[in-house]
Image (cartoon, rainbow, N blue to C red):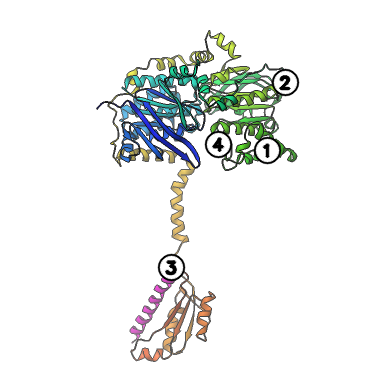
Amino acid sequence: MTPAADIASLQAVTHRYGPTNALDDVTLSIPAGCMAGLIGPDGVGKSTMLALIAGVRKIQTGSVRVLDGDMGNARHRQRCFSRIAYMPQGLGRNLYPTLSVFENLDFIARLFGLSKAERTDRIHNLLTSIDLNQFRDRPAGKLSGGMKQKLSLCSALLHNPYLLVLDEPTTGVDPLSRRQFWELIERIRSQRDRMSVIVATAYMEEAERFDWLASMNDGRVIASGTPAEIKQQTNTTDLESAFVAMLPQAIQDVHKPVIIPPRTDHPGPPAIEAEGLTKRFGKFVAVDHVSFRIERGEIFGFLGSNGCGKSTTMKMLTGLLPSSDGSATLLGKPINDKGVESRSRVGYMSQSFSLYSELTVRQNLLLHARLFEIPADEKIPRLEEMLDRFGLRESADERPDALPLGMRQRLQLAVAVQHKPEMLILDEPTSGVDPIARDEFWQYLVDLSRNDGVTIFLSTHFMNEAERCDRISLMHAGKVLAVDTPQALTESRNASTLEEAFVAFLEDARAPQASHTSKNEPESEIGTSQKIPQPAPNQAFALGRLWAYARRESVEILRDRMRLAFAILGPIILLLTFGYGISFDVENLPFAVYDQDQTPESRQLLQSFDGSPYFQRQDDIDAPDQIDARLKTGELMLAIEIPPQFGKDLISGKAPEVGIWLDGAMPFRAETTSGYLSGVAAKYLSNRQAQS
């Protein structure tokens, strides 16, 4: 059969989330056997389109065809699952935090039926290719954001798919690792005929290497073709300019290029001065004798490889982590991790959002105003100022989760600066944000730095952002490699771009043996053999998958002490509780007797009840109307009426009847009581028979 020309095609696809159109009547064909990219602002439908192509989201309107079949057909979708690898947007969303790097990959490999030799070779070569081999025993939850992304990429590549669907896979990954990753993809594609890759990306320089692109805005595809064709259509020289040129005129009119005015000197001590700052976690040295100085009002960039200690350094400088060695001053005062005075002068924006999703934008700002102890008469004016300054007024009553990523970034920045700090520390603040939103974010940073005199210390993996900084520091493996202006660092390596200079610094800093292994890994060992076993398309159950899940659950339980304690002690506690604390017996039932016979035979019957632990006799009933009255008040659960002539009829061999009134408000209790009554009656008759 001739392979299809398109790996995926969408016809009149519309997808809504409530009243919002994520995709609006989209018709698009993505060519097979190429590297296809989706570019566009946040919230335009890129992630929704990729989820529909991967088969993880239900089609609402229109048709989606992938791998020569309709993804609306359950059988075809089931067959595709073993041939498609899907990596969703977000840091490590397809990872298990308590499992190590190796164990995460080993679990995925077992799910796809790889043999032990294949698992070992493939995992080793993938980890080596993106420089994660030295962290193979570290829990995924303790990796940096960029390292989580790299591990997620390995998970997606592990089973050798026909189609890779990657939603912003390299967000937060350093330039050298990004380069290694795409080189790895190219090697695999060169060995695997017609392997297709569909990627959504926020890096325009990354999109330059793709074979085919589609640009999206407001749920629609506004342009498609090769990068050269798109640049030719827009009469631009780079994709970032082409991307802006393709947007509606209203957006272009609002967008302004970022201009960094010269910095003016500020008197007083430096904003930050670190000398020999060190942080150890056990035997692992995360930050190794770092020294640098940041002047007041300066925009200082922090660049480095993933896991090099950038976030750890920032946390030490904000007092969130104590240092193991060395010293640091913040705004002229020593940093005290136990004090709050220095923290009140600093705004900190972490790598992951610290917003409260159950609160609205306005409520988040108001809550943080209280946390920072802003005076009562200033809270509302300050809140209104933040809403206007950061363009949040129209979304003031929405929750953060409902906002596009770029707007959430602005809200996080507003939260960090509303107490008017002198120092702002930002940990990769624009990861995953499109160029328009990124430039808009930087307009706010420039305004804070140049007009308000706020010192800005930020980490980033975007080279165009690093070029906007007054000075930058390059860091690797916990050590600072160089500190200077972007231009000076570029010239020091005789490089044409800052990215080339950065990569050169990193390559020189890496251990020679690691560099040798990475560069000389045989391509045949990447593991792209066509012989890799795939799960049967319609196989509902497989022992291998069952064992993989059982093994993973066992490892997670054994590592989590609290979970392990509940797993072992929980059933024991429940067993003891049920065994000793719960009884289905009914004891001490209050009852009363209306004895109209008053003979030895009737008294003998009542003695059977008096001698039972299940019944507790109350005052006798004197009149028939007392029976209902005492049952209704709850005084009695049981009333016994012995008719006249009971003893006489019993002696004469007749079968006299006894009236029983039982409270049925609790059916289970009444049913149990009924059984007890039958038992007492049977015992009474047995004793009578024995006596006669």
According to the picture, the residue beneath numbered tag 3 turns out to be 668
Q: In the displayed image of the protein, which residue is found farthest to the left?
A: 1
Residue 126 seen by the camera: yes
Quick one: SS at disc 4?
Answer: loop
Task: Decide if residue 420 is on the left or right side of residue 691.
Answer: right
Name the kind of residue labelled 3 in the image.
Answer: Phe
According to the picture, the residue beneath numbered tag 4 turns out to be 403
According to the picture, the residue beneath numbered tag 2 turns out to be 269
Q: Quadrant of the N terminus?
A: top left
* On screen, residue 226 above or below 552: above
- Estimate the spatial distance between the alpha carbons at disc 3 and disc 4, rounded to whole Å: 53 Å
What segment carries the magenta color? 668-692
Residue 369 marker: 1
Q: Earlier in the sequence, mark 2 or mark 1?
A: 2
Name the kind of residue labelled 2 in the image.
Answer: Pro
Residue 278 seen by the camera: no
- Estimate the spatial distance between the alpha carbons at disc 4 and disc 1, rounded to whole Å: 21 Å
Question: Do the residues under discs 3 and 2 have CB atoms within 8 angstroms?
Answer: no
| Residue 334 place in picture, x, y as percent | 69, 26
